[in-house]
Amino acid sequence: MNALGNEASAEAVTVLLLEDDAPTLWRLQDALTRAGYQVRAAGTLAEARAALAKGAPKVLLTDLQLPDGHGVDLIRETRQRFPDTEIMVISILGDEESVISAITVGATGYLLKDAFPTDIAATVRDLVAGHSPISASIARFIVRRTQNNAEPPPGPALNTAKLTPREIDILWGIAKGFSYAEIASHLGLSRQTVPGHIKSIYRKLEVHTRGEAVFEAVQQGLIRL
Amino acid sequence: MPGLVWYIVLQALIAVIWAVILRLPPPEPAPQYLLSGFTLREAGVTRPVTLPHFSASRFSMDDPPLYSGRFDWTGADAKRAWSVLLPRFTNGVEVSVNGVVILDSRRDPAANRPDRNTPEIAVIPASVLREGANDLAIRLFVWGPITGFLDRVFVGPDEALRPSYDARTLLFVTLPVVFSAWQAILAVILGIMWVMRRHEPAYGVLAAAMAIGVAQAFLQTPMGESPFSRVNVVLISSAPLESALVLTFALLFFGWKWQRWAFLMFAPGILLALGGLFGHQTLSRALFLFLGVPMVGVSLLVLAYVAARAALQRQNVAGLLLGCAATAMLTGWIFDLLSVFQLMPNRIFVARLSYSALLVAIGAGLTWRFASALNQVDGFAGRLVTRVREAEDKLKASFAREEERARAAALARERTRLMRDLHDGLGGQLVSIVALSERGHAGASVGDAARAALKDLRLVIDSMDDIGGDLMLALGSWRERAMAQLRPHDMALHWHAVTAQGLPVHPELRPWHVIQIVRLLDEGLTNAVKHAATRTVTVTIETLAGADGLDRGRITVADDGRGFDVAAGAAKAARGLRNMRDRAARCGAELELDSDAAGTRVRLTLPHRFPDSDAAAI
């Protein structure tokens, strides 16, 4: 019902949806179309690239495991060619590793496959509005990387060195299930600034170039020169 | 048997070599200075004698035998000092030239010891000498029991006589002192050894023997009456006492079991001491000859036998050394005996000197034993190190095995738990979905069942994540799911963490605790959705400071619905409640449920420490 209210503003928003499982694709397409988004659907990386060649969408919504490759490659390409495009990962069960690896190549949000249609539309809308969603489990995954463990936890490498203590506090709050309002009051922030911090966290976790990736690997001690 | 033969041959060899050494003539000046033509006046009778001369044993200082001789001196010799050399005498001499006394050996304590072979030299004052013939008179003081003895006498330039005097002094005076010092050191070392090792009395006994020897050597025996003369006489008993102690040491050292009658060994020495203290000097001296000397000989014989046995039967190196030393000493003792009974042309006592051989043997034996003990300790330490290392390796291996087993067991437990969790939740829900779709129930109910299945799968996956004992991290994910669950029902979730920290951290928290707690909360939430007809569910998280200083976490799920009768619920609701209580019990948590018209409240108070084993699940 929130989506209906925003129909007029959402009209111009184009979404490129890449999902190989047909029922899921239909379901997401239905939810987004009903919310007023202009959706182009693709089932393979090749189709998605063809669609991208015709023009940049506002939002790229992509699955990661695809029949002709991995969604991460598409995310990286899109990030480089269309910096204004918001990129979201479609995830089943919010599995942190896939989401985090997508974040490091430029994704700024994720969408659960089984989310309710209204939630699907709301998430995309929030993202376009500049609010990156972040789940407790992903926040937990990130903050665990900020702790100095002798043995790095399993999963993709993640450079958290750029995160400020405040951002880490926010992530802790999210991981523990606090709302943005609660986090803001605990940390003495304005509630409105919390989404901005989260967006900033996403940006900081992104590894922009190959050179930077090497630099950060050195920073984290993964590579010894 | 060949061992015995070899041993006897060796001892015979030692005895022969020692005898040859002892027969070597002691240093003497050139024969041209030898004085001859002495006359002896004894008991009023004067007769010519040839030196060396033995005179009868006496017990009085009065009217001693007087040896008179003559020597020529010319004024041409006035530039050089002339001396009289008496290489050997027993027991004391008074020398006078031309009626002037120039030497009285009784004032030299070393010379008073018949066992020391002390020579005497005296420079003749030039004023006493006359051109031509000079008279030399030697009064020989003899005190029993041994007979008097006067070796040949030399008169001549001091430079010609003194080298042989010095050589004799070195051999018969200085060397015994050196050996006595050696004995003193041995006494100290052995004494310390005995103090540190009281269970080895042998060393104490030997230390006592050495101490007596040292006392005998260094305590002087002046002639004449003095307040200590009686005590001095006791010293005469030192030789038999010392030999008895050395023998005792040997017996103990070679493992002989001490017998009471063995104290008889000390009887001669004690008798001698008593005789010295209470009897007349002559008595004690007579006693010495008949008690002390044989005692020394008997001791040496027994010592030789005991040492031989140890050397032959047990290949004891200390035994061999001691045996050789005993042989040498016995040879010396026999020599002295022959000397005493005037069966030797000269009278040089060698037993004391031979005793030094024994001392050297004792010192060498001790050092050998000490070194071998050190080697044994080293070997033992080495073996110990090896053993400890082996034991350590074994322990490490078994520890690694144990760890591996424990890890495998933990893994198996975890697998079992995961299977049960999947089976309990997901399995049932999937079956339910299959059943619903077979009956053609498309739509809502299939969707709900599938959603529930997904939710459960998420819970199981979530619970596998390491949350470092912070239950809040699990509740964070649960909150997201709960909100997603409530949203379609237009219900709001109020999340109220009383403190920023939320719940205490439980390092012992295990995934199965998390699953039980989250499922319990899920059931509370589901009940609220299904039965309460409410708009709001409030979750309160707080930490209670216990009276005992132990913090406990509490999670409350409350709704503002119409409530229900906790006691008399429907069968399904009752089963749900029983499930909740069961889950709480498994985690050691307390569950309070109350429901009234104002709503239903599920209050879960966590334990201070979660239980290790899931007893109820077995």
Image (spheres, rainbow, N blue to C red):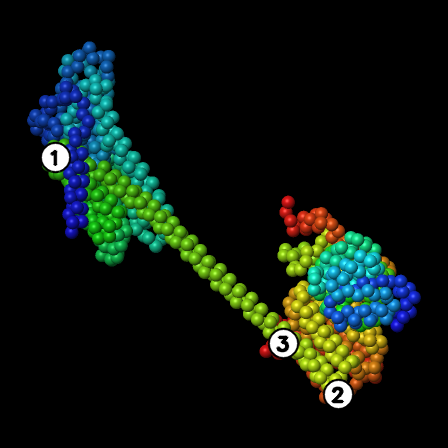
The amino acid beneath tag 2 is Gly
- SS under mark 1: loop
Q: Which of B155 and A174 is in front in this view?
A: A174
* Number of residues whose C-alpha sits closer than 10 Å to that of mark 1, classed few (under 14), some (14–19) or many (20 or more): some
- SS under mark 3: helix
Residue B379, image x and y in percent? Answer: 37, 51
Residue B121 shown left or right of residue A12 in the figure:
left
Q: Mark 3 points at which residue?
A: B420
Residue B1, image x and y in percent? Answer: 16, 51
The amino acid beneath tag 1 is Met
Q: Which residue is drawn at 81% across and 69% down?
A: A29
Cβ–Cβ under 8 Å for marks 3 and 1: no
Relative height, residue B108 to residue A52 (above, below):
above
Residue B184 shown left or right of residue A107 in the figure:
left
Q: Mark 2 lies on which chain?
A: B
Q: Mark 2 points at which residue?
A: B569
Q: Which of marks 3 and 2 is in front?
A: 3
Q: Residue at x 13, y 23 (%)?
A: B68
Residue B81 shown left or right of residue B427 in the figure:
left
* Number of residues whose C-alpha sits closer than 10 Å to that of mark 2, classed few (under 14), some (14–19) or many (20 or more): few
Q: In which quarter of the image is residue A167?
A: bottom right
Q: Which residue is drawn at 64% across and 45% down?
A: A225
Relative height, residue A181 to residue B95 (above, below):
below
Instruction: Give the Cα distance between marks 3 and 1.
Output: 113 Å
Q: Which callout, 3 or 2, points at the residue further toward the start of the chain?
A: 3
Q: Is residue B408 visible?
A: yes
Q: Which of B10 and B92 is in front in this view?
A: B10
Q: Are marks 3 and 1 on the same chain?
A: yes
Instruction: Give the Cα distance between marks 2 and 1.
Output: 132 Å
